[in-house]
């Protein structure tokens, strides 16, 4: 994978999350979010929760909000498909829900099995009632997450930032 | 419709009585109830602002409990749900066990049936064993409860023993009258936050 050691956007996202007092960080381990996950796991102000499937994160963050804490859900686009019914919880109850999605199946994808869900991701999110913000270039990511976080926590609202595979680099399996 | 007589129709513990006792003298206990009969049982025991009753989000009750327990480490959180609801979100068991919140207990009312859809059998009517799954997931303590003695022993542990705890309470399969809590999710959320966090929580 080509996402580099010098990428600044994971640190920018981490700073935005800190500024918005995000306390619970839920994720299924993901290469695109690797650096951000490590930053959050090291941050004493945040509790990192590793999930077995992404829909657990929607429920977790609902409980966090009931208890007075803000959270964020980090996932790959394939995980959006795992969340669909659970997104009803956030919509019906008006839980703030910030999702940061690294895209697969979108830009030069090597693995065709990733393509159907990757291509459907923005529409699935919109149909489920989430606002969709797309960040196609590395320099847009920090400000896009900031814009989404403001709308989520001032809402409450449900929003996803889609981080393009163009930024992350397509996995090539050495081919 | 499945009309086979199963063992769960003979279990001595009755779910409404079990839930009344789980919630008696609840103090500052925080409660999440799973879709659907567990939610009706808790309403029968008495609607309460610090009970968050799920009308949907099947498979999510235990995870909502985890988020709440992590956010409120000084309070006890109790998740009360059913076997069908728990089976839909089994990944929550290792997710909870890894975080290991000391203030979280999960109580499953296991009647071995899907109550809302016509009392069809769940996998726990067969070989599936939820308490064994919780142990396998890494819960330090999990047990099956079949009778009054087991329940009497478990009740103080559910309230006070360091968690995470998992109790699978075998209850009689029975059709009971619906007792419904409020169903407006936004109201239930705001009511819960106001009761827990004060006026700021409702803002």
Image (cartoon, rainbow, N blue to C red):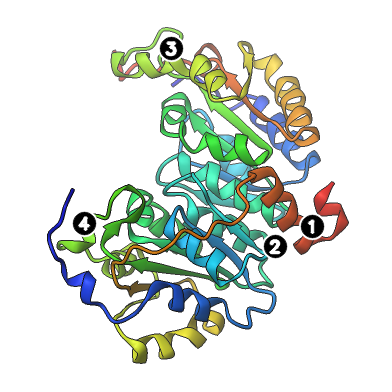
Instruction: Judge the density around disc 2: few (<14), some (14-19), many (≥20) Cα neighbours within 10 Å.
Output: some
Task: Give SS at disc 3.
Answer: helix
Image mark 4: chain: B
The residue singled out by tag 2 in the image is B49
- Nearer-N-terminus badge (2/4): 2
Instruction: Judge the density around disc 3: few (<14), some (14-19), many (≥20) Cα neighbours within 10 Å.
Output: some
Q: Which is more toward the observer, B2 or B72?
A: B2
Q: Which corner quadrant of the image does residue A155 belong to?
A: top right
Image mark 1: chain: B
Rendered image: mark on residue B194: 1
Instruction: Judge the density around disc 1: few (<14), some (14-19), many (≥20) Cα neighbours within 10 Å.
Output: some
The residue singled out by tag 4 in the image is B123
CA separation in Å, label 4 and label 3: 36 Å
Task: Give SS at disc 1.
Answer: helix
- The answer to whether residue B189 of the structure is visible from this angle is yes
Task: Give SS at disc 4.
Answer: helix
Contact between marks 2 and 1 (CB within 8 A): the answer is yes
Q: Nearer the viewer, mark 4 or mark 3?
A: 4
Which residue is pictured at 85% across the width and 46% down the height?
A: B203
Which residue is pictured at 49% across the width and 55% down the height?
A: B61
- Nearer-N-terminus badge (1/4): 4
Task: Give SS at disc 2.
Answer: loop
CA separation in Å, label 2 and label 3: 42 Å
Contact between marks 2 and 3 (CB within 8 A): the answer is no
Do marks 1 and 3 share a subunit? no
Image mark 2: chain: B
Which residue is pictured at 48% across the width and 58% down the height?
A: B62
Residue B17, horizontal then vertical, whole percent: 45, 78
Residue A114, horizontal then vertical, whole percent: 35, 19
């Amino acid at each position: 994978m080509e996402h580099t050691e010098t990428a600044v956007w994971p640190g920018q996202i981490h700073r935005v999350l800190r500024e918005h007092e995000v306390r619970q960080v839920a994720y299924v381990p993901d290469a695109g979010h690797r650096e951000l996950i490590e930053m959050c796991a090291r941050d004493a102000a945040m509790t990192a929760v590793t999930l077995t499937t992404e829909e657990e994160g929607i429920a977790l963050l609902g409980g966090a909000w009931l208890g007075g804490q803000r959270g964020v859900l980090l996932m790959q686009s394939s995980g959006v498909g795992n969340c669909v019914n659970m997104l009803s919880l956030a919509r019906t109850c008006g839980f703030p829900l910030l999702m940061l999605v690294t895209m697969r199946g979108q830009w030069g994808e090597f693995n065709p099995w990733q393509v159907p869900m990757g291509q459907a991701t923005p529409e699935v999110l919109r149909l489920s009632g989430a606002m969709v913000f797309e960040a196609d270039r590395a320099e847009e990511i920090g400000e896009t997450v900031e814009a989404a976080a403001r709308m989520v926590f001032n809402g409450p609202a449900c929003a996803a930032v889609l981080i393009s595979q163009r930024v992350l680099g397509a996995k090539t399996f050495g081919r | 419709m499945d009309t086979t007589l199963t063992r769960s129709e003979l279990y001595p513990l009755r779910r409404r009585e079990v839930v009344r006792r789980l919630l008696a003298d609840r103090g500052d206990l925080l409660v999440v109830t799973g879709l659907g009969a567990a939610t009706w049982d808790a309403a029968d025991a008495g609607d309460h602002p610090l009970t968050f009753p799920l009308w949907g989000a099947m498979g999510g009750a235990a995870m909502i409990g985890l988020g709440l327990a992590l956010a409120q480490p000084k309070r006890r959180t109790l998740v009360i749900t059913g076997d069908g609801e728990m089976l839909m979100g089994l990944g929550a068991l290792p997710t909870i066990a890894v975080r290991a919140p000391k203030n979280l207990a999960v109580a499953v009312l296991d009647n071995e049936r899907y109550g809302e859809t016509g009392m069809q059998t769940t996998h726990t009517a067969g070989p599936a064993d939820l308490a064994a799954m919780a142990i396998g997931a890494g819960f330090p303590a999990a047990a099956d409860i079949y009778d009054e003695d087991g329940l009497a022993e478990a009740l103080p542990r559910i309230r006070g023993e360091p968690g995470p705890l998992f109790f699978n309470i075998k209850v009689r399969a029975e059709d009971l009258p619906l007792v419904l809590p409020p169903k407006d999710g936004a109201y239930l959320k705001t009511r819960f936050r106001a009761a827990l966090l004060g006026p700021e929580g409702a803002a």
